[in-house]
Image (cartoon, coloured by chain):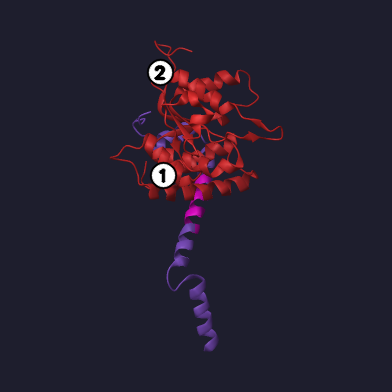
Amino acid sequence: MTKHIAPPATFEQISQSLGLAPEEMEFLDGVIEKVLKEEEEEEEALKPGKGREGATFEAKKESKS
Amino acid sequence: MDFSGPSALKINEQSVFLNVPFDPEYSSLFIALIAGLTALGRKPHCVLEVPSDGRNRLERIFGLIASCGASIHDLSRVGLSGELKVPRFNMPFELGITYALSQITSHGFFVLEEKAFRLQVSLSDLNGHDPHIHDGTQTGVLRCVLDCFGTPAKAPSLSVLETLTKRLAKTALRLQKGHKTEGPFHPFLFQQIEWAAANLARRQGLI
C-alpha cells in the first residue's frame, strides 16, 4: 500500500470535531501545562551544577562554613 | 450504505481508523499512534466511539471505518487471551471489512505487526501486502506512521514525534489517574487524549 496523502487538519479542525466543552478544554490545557512545567524542571535539574549533585555540593559548602 | 450519488457517505480523508488491541501492554503503543497521527494532521478514530452494548454495533463500526479515509490494523496479538484463552477475531474481521471497502472506495489501509514474517503465517491471504513492523516499541510505531502517512517535504523528524509521544504519555497518565482507570481505552479518555495530542502538537508547531 502506498502512502496515504491528505491535506493535514489544523488544531482548530481537530478540536472542533471532538466537541469538548470549553471547561473540559481548559482543564486539559491545565494538565498539559503541568506536564510541560514538570519536564522543564527535570531538564533544569539535569543541567551541570544543578540537581542532586549540585545540591549536595552546596550542602557540603554550607556545612564547612 | 451509499458510496456514490448525492446521498453518498461523507468520507473524511484526514480521519484514520485504528484497529488495534485494547490491552494494557498496548497502551504505550496506542499513545504513540495517537501522537504520531495527530502530529501529521490526522484524526484517529476507533471502536471506543461505538457503544459496546448499542444496537447495530457492527453497522456502526462499518460506518465509522467507511467514514475514514484510511485505517491502521495492528495484527500483533495472535495468541490466546482472557480467562477463556481464546484468540481474538475482531481485529482480523475488521481488517476483512476494510479490505472489501478498499476495493470499492479510495480507503487506504495499512497493516502493522510486531514481528517480521509472522503475518505470512497468521494471515497468508494477505501476502503481497507487506506489513509495517514496529518491534513493539513506540519509536517503531512512530516510524510506521511516518512510513504510511508522512510526506517527505513536511513530515516532522522521528525525534520530534518521540518528544510529543513522551509528553502525551505523561498527560494520559495524569488523566488516567484522575479518572481512576488503568489504561487509555475508555471513550471519554480517548477523546481527551486526542485533544491533548492536538494541543501538544500545536505547541510544538506541528499543526
Q: Are marks 1 and 2 on the same chain?
A: yes
Residue A33 part of the magenta-drawn span: yes
- Between the residue at mark 1 and the residue at mark 2, the CA separation in whole angstroms equals 30 Å
The chain coloured red carries which letter? Answer: B
- Residue B88 in sight from this viewpoint: yes
Q: Residue furthest right?
A: B83
Judged from the image, the secondary structure of the residue bearing numbered disc 2 is: loop
Q: Label 2 is found on which chain of the structure?
A: B
The residue sitting at 38% across, 47% down in the picture is B158
Q: Nearer the viewer, residue A44 or A26?
A: A44
Q: Residue sitting at 61 percent across and 42 percent down? A: B24
Where residue A47 appears, as percent x and y from the top left, is 43, 68
Residue B80 locus on image (x, y percent): 64, 34
Q: Colour of chain A?
A: purple
Name the amino acid, label 2.
Thr
Image: B2 above or below B145: above
Task: Tell me where the magenta segment starts and ends, as one range.
Answer: A28-38
Q: Residue at x 38, y 39 (%)?
A: B146
Q: Is residue A25 within the magenta segment?
A: no
Marks 1/2 in contact by CB < 8 Å: the verdict is no
| Residue assigned mark 1 | B201
Outermost residue toward the left? B153
Q: Is residue B40 visible?
A: no
Residue designated by label 2: B105
